Image (cartoon, rainbow, N blue to C red):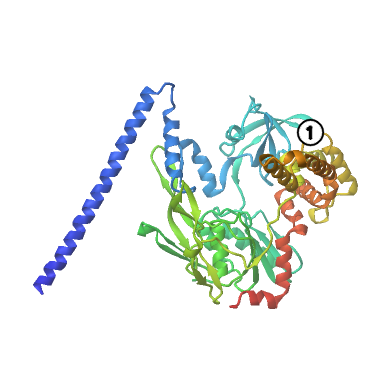
Amino acid sequence: MKRYKKLILGGILAVGIFSAYKASDEYFEVSKNLDIFASVYKEVNLSYVDDVEPGSLIKTAIDAMLKSLDPYTNYYSEAQTEDYRFQVTGEYGGIGATIRQRGEYIVIDNPYEGYPAQQADLRAGDKILEVDGKSAKGKTSDDMTKLLKGSAGTDITMKIERLGVGEMVKTFKRAKIKVNNVPYFGMVDKETGYIKLTGFTPDAGKEVQDALKNLKKNNERMKSVILDLRGNGGGLLHEAVNVVNTFVKKGELVTSTKGRDRDNNRNYSTLDAAIDDGISLVVLIDGGSASASEIVSGSLQDLDRGVLIGQKSFGKGLVQSSKVLTYNTQMKITTSKYYIPSGRCIQKLDYSHKVNGKAEAIADSLKRNFYTRNRRPVRDGEGVTPDIKTPESKYTKITQSLLSKNIIFDFATQYRNTHDAIKMTKDFELTEKDFQDFVTFTSGKDYNYNTDTEDALQKFKVQATKENYLSELNSEYESLLNKLQRNKSNDLEKYKDEIMQVLEEEIASRYYYEKARIEASFDNDIEIREAILLLKDTVKYNSLLSAK
C-alpha cells in the first residue's frame, strides 16, 4: 500500500513540476518576444528614414496581431472608445442622423424620428456646408461624425443647402441618442403581428416584449407573430436570452458558453415568465443574421417554438468579452463559443486552422447531427438553416446602379422638397406621371452598369482572344453586343415595378422615417408573404415543428 502511495505522490509531483516548467517556458516565450518587439519598435522610431507616429505604429502592430486571430477580436484606442461604446450600448451624444458622402461634401442620409436633426427639420439630401463655422468641404464621413457628435445639451449650428430652396442655417442642441432595437412593429394583416428587430443593445429584450404586449392589447384578433431578424448582426448575449424569453417560459436553457478559461463556461436560461409561450411564431433570417440573432433563431428552432423562414444565417458561434486596458483603451476579445439547446455550435469558419492566412469552412465530414426537442434533425458548423428556404432577394443590375449612383436618393430628395405631404404609407402609391418624371430625371445621368450577359460576353471575348478565334467571331460578337445595348435602353420600363417599389420606400421614408421604409416594403417581401401563408395553415405549421 505504501508503495502505491509513493507512486501516486510521485505522479502528482511529476505533473506539478511539468506544469511549472510549462508555465515557466510560456512566460519566457512571452517575455522574450515582448523584448524583441520593443527592440524593433525602438529602432524604427529612432532610425527609420522618415518621421513615424509612435501611437499609429503601435496601433497598426496591435491591429495586425489581432487580425491574425479572428475578425471579432479588436483593439480600441482612446479616440475610438466612443465608437465602441455606441456598438455596445447603442447610445451616443449627437444630432440623431446618419450621413453619406457626396463628392466633396457630406449630406444628411436619414434623420432619426424624435431626435434633434428631425426636430430641427433637417432632411435627407440636405448638403452640410458648415458646422459651427467650420467649412465642411472636403470632410470625410469620419471627420463629419466627429464634428456632429458631442455631449448632450451642447449647441450646434449647421449651415446647409437644400435642393430647390437654397442655403439655410439651423441652430439646435445635441441630445443623448439611443437607437431603437425595434424600429417598427405593427400588423401585416388582421391576424398577424410583425416585429422588426435590428440590434441587441441594452433593452432589446424589453423592446420586443413591449412590442408584443402592445400588439396583443390593441389587436384582439391577432393569432400569430413574425419576428424579423434579417440583417441583424447581433450584440449582447444576455439580450438574446431576453428576446427568447418573450416566447419561451421561465427556466429554459437558451445557450451555453465554453472557452479555454473555465470562468467563461456558463449556462444562460430564461429568467421570467414568457409574454406568450403559445402564440404561433415565425422567425425570418438571412445571411446577415449573425451572433445573437443566431442564438435567438437557433434556440427557438431547437426548442421547436417557431418556424424559421429565409436563407441560412451567417454562422458566427463565437462570444466576445470587453476588457478595459490602460490609458482609456479597451479591447473586445473572443473568449468562448456558444452552444444552443440541442448542443450544436453554429460557428461556420475555423479560425484556429487557417490555410494561407484564411479561415476555412468547417469540413462536412466534421459536422454532426443534433436533434431539436421534437427530434427534428439539425446540423452544427454551418449557421442556422431555416425550416423553409426562400431564394435570396436581389435587385436587378439597373436598380442596383440607380441606388449606388444615388439617383433614386436624389429623386426622392427632389420629390420631398416639391411635395409637402403624402398619404400614410399603406395608402401611398406613385402614379404613372411620377414614374415618367423619374425617367426624365434620369436623362443624362450616369448609371451605367453591366448585365450578367455582358459580363459573360466579356469573358467569351477574353477566352476567344486567347484561343485566336476572335477574328472569325468578332462580327457575331459585336452584333450581340449592339442588340444587348438596345435592349438595355428599355430596362427602366422593363423593371418598372421593382424601381417603383424602391422609389416608394425611399420617398415614404422622407415623410414618415424608418417605420415607413419598413412598412412600404411589405407588399413585395417574399419571406413575409411566405410567413403569412404558413401561419394561416395550422396543419402545415404544426407538421414543420414535428419529427419527420
Residue at far right of view: 433
Q: Observer-nearest residue: 418 or 473? A: 473
Q: Residue 492: where, in percent of width, then height?
A: 83, 45
- Left-right relation of 328 to 288: left
Image-quadrant location for residue 474: top right
Q: Residue at x 63, y 32 (%)?
A: 156
What percent of the width, then of the height, locates residue 73? 46, 47
Name, please, the residue furthest toward the left. 2
| Residue at x 67% of width, y 63% of height | 214
Q: Is residue 363 visible?
A: yes
Q: Which residue is drawn at the image coordinates 54% and 66% (left, top)?
A: 299
Callout 1 environment at 10 Å: few (<14), some (14 to 19), or many (20+)? some
Q: Is residue 183 above or below residue 3?
A: above
Q: In which image quadrant can residue 226 be found?
A: bottom right
Q: Residue at x 32, y 38 (%)?
A: 34
Q: Is residue 273 depicted above or below 71 in this figure?
A: below
| Rendering coords of residue 185 (x, y %) | 69, 59
Which quadrant, please, contains the N terminus?
Answer: bottom left
In this figure, which residue is indicated by the disc labeled 1?
A: 163
